[in-house]
Image (cartoon, rainbow, N blue to C red):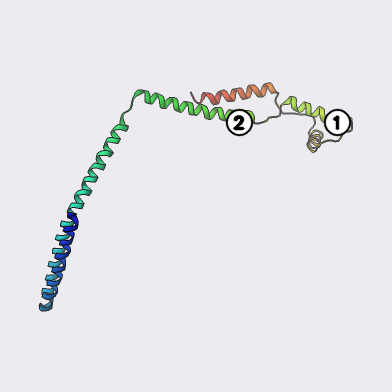
Amino acid sequence: MLNLLELRRAQDATLNLHCISAVMQKNLSKLQKKNIFMINQAIRNIILSKIMQPSLFIISRLVAIFLFILTTTFSLEAQEYATDRLFMKEFGKTKCRNLVENKIKSLKLNPVMTLEQEALLNQNVWSKLRLKLPLSPGEKLHLRKLKQKGIYSNKLSAKDIWTRNAEKFKGLRLKCK
């Protein structure tokens, strides 16, 4: 309410100044007009500064409150206990272990043909040929490869694959310790 009254008074004062300055400007020379213009500007600046003082006070108070809240929150975050470090260390290890276990699961699901499976497939293809049964497209392809390369296989046995995977998985798990 006070701000509105002060604002009205300031507006009335500026209107009065305008009226007075208009009358004075008609009668004075150009140099005097410049001086009056500068005086009017100074008066307006004084009036505006009086209007702005309460709002500057409020803004400065809000800034002080904001800085107080900001400093108290930083001091609260700065408190650290030894258990916090241990928890964060274990949390990092657990996260690493979970990622490694997920990778191991995906590697286990990846199918790899073993030596035994390939021998069974070869036996199946040869027996179908002897009995003159029709071959599937995959079996025809496999037969062509057998005729070109012979019965040579670079596949590992299931036991060798399991030992190789066990070493690989152990190495992955050791990275998280």
Percent position of residue 142, x then y: 78, 34
Q: Residue at label 2?
A: 106
Q: In this view, does 70 lie above or below 165?
A: below
- Label 1: few (<14), some (14–19) or many (≥20) C-alpha neighbours in 10 Å: some
Q: Residue furthest front?
A: 1
Residue at position x 24%, y 42% in the image:
65
Q: In this view, does 158 lie above or below 35?
A: above
Q: Earlier in the sequence, mark 1 or mark 2?
A: 2
Seen from the viewer's position, the closer of residues 116 and 80 is 80
Q: What numbered label is drawn on residue 128? A: 1
Q: In this view, does 174 lie above or below 25?
A: above
Disc 1 marks a residue whose amino acid type is Lys
- Label 2: few (<14), some (14–19) or many (≥20) C-alpha neighbours in 10 Å: few
Secondary structure under tag 1 reads helix
Secondary structure under tag 2 reads helix
Percent position of residue 88, x then y: 41, 27
- Please indicate whether residue 126 sits to the left or right of residue 38 in the image: right
